[in-house]
Image: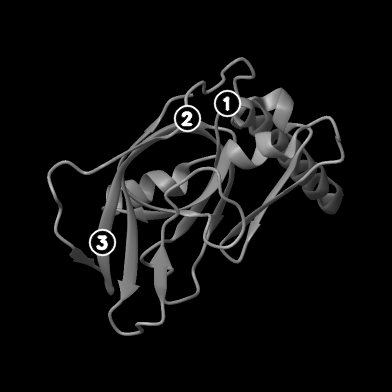
């Protein structure tokens, strides 16, 4: 009899946990669409190269982005994992529209962002030109903590710099940022030093 009661209690607790998850999990606002592209501008007051962790950082451009999180990936292995712990695949314009995104499969691995769709009505350029994988370099622990709490499909705003970075101890380990949103393939990711992060939606 005791075993039956125990099993009943466990089933009840499991059902409650599922119910609470459904209540409190993040639910995206289907009506919210990011209408503007990322803003990239020349750095007016020159910023000297600086050291962060085991990397020398070279600021290239001011950068500001509002975008929906298509996918988030944490990296814990590799000489650059402390320096850039998170990659964010981000989308704007059509690629921030949840109804549009429901037709596209998004994934990340090995510092790359991948998409695929069976819907032939979706122009490939719309996907490629309105989304990008960002290697995020957190300016401080507060930003890193914020990154850890981000959820897929949230809309965020970030500011900082697009950068190049080279490892001091292993010169062959080098991160180079793309400076256009229109490229694809190797070298198309943004390396983004983030000093401000805000959840918009």
Q: Nearer the viewer, residue 187 or 138?
A: 187
* Image height of 185 relative to 101, above or below: below
Check disc 1 and report its element: helix, strand or loop: helix
Does residue 27 appear in this view?
no
Q: Residue at x 85, y 35 (%)?
A: 119
Give the residue pinned by disc 3.
58
Residues packed near mark 3 inside 10 Å, few (<14), some (14 to 19) or many (20 plus):
some
Q: Are marks 2 and 1 in contact (CB under 8 Å)?
A: yes
Q: Nearer the viewer, residue 183 or 192?
A: 183
Residue 142 in the image, given as x and y percentages of width and height: 29, 47
Residues packed near mark 2 inside 10 Å, few (<14), some (14 to 19) or many (20 plus):
some
Q: Residue at x 50, y 32 (%)?
A: 67
Give the residue pinned by disc 2.
37
Query: Of callouts 2 and 1, which one flags the residue occurring earlier in the amino acid sequence?
Result: 2
Left or right, 56 with respect to 1, comes to: left
Does residue 113 appear in this view?
yes
Q: Nearer the viewer, residue 71 or 172?
A: 172
Residue 162 in the image, given as x and y percentages of width and height: 34, 50
Rounded to the nearest whole Å, what is the CA distance between mark 3 and mark 1? 30 Å
Q: Are marks 3 and 1 in contact (CB under 8 Å)?
A: no
* Image height of 185 relative to 123, above or below: below
Q: Residue at x 61, y 15 (%)?
A: 31
Residue 146 in the image, given as x and y percentages of width and height: 38, 44
Left or right, 19 with respect to 112, comes to: right
Left or right, 111 with respect to 198, comes to: right
Give the residue pinned by disc 1.
93
């Amino acid at each position: 009899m005791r075993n039956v009661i125990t099993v009943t209690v466990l089933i009840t607790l499991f059902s409650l946990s599922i119910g609470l998850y459904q209540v409190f999990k993040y639910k995206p606002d289907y009506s919210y669409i990011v209408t503007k592209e990322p803003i990239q501008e020349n750095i007016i007051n020159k910023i000297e190269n600086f050291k962060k962790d085991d990397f020398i950082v070279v600021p290239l451009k001011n950068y500001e982005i509002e975008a929906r999180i298509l996918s988030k990936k944490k990296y814990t292995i590799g000489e650059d994992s402390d320096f850039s712990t998170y990659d964010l695949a981000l989308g704007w314009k059509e690629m921030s529209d949840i109804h549009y995104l429901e037709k596209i499969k998004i994934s990340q691995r090995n510092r790359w962002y991948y998409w695929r769709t069976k819907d032939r009505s979706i122009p490939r350029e719309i996907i490629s030109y309105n989304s990008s994988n960002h290697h995020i370099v957190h300016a401080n622990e507060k930003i890193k903590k914020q990154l850890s709490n981000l959820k897929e499909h949230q809309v965020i705003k970030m500011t900082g710099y697009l950068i190049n970075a080279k490892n001091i101890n292993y010169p062959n380990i080098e991160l180079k940022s793309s400076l256009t949103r229109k490229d694809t393939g190797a070298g198309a990711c943004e390396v983004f030093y983030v000093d401000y992060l805000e959840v918009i939606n």
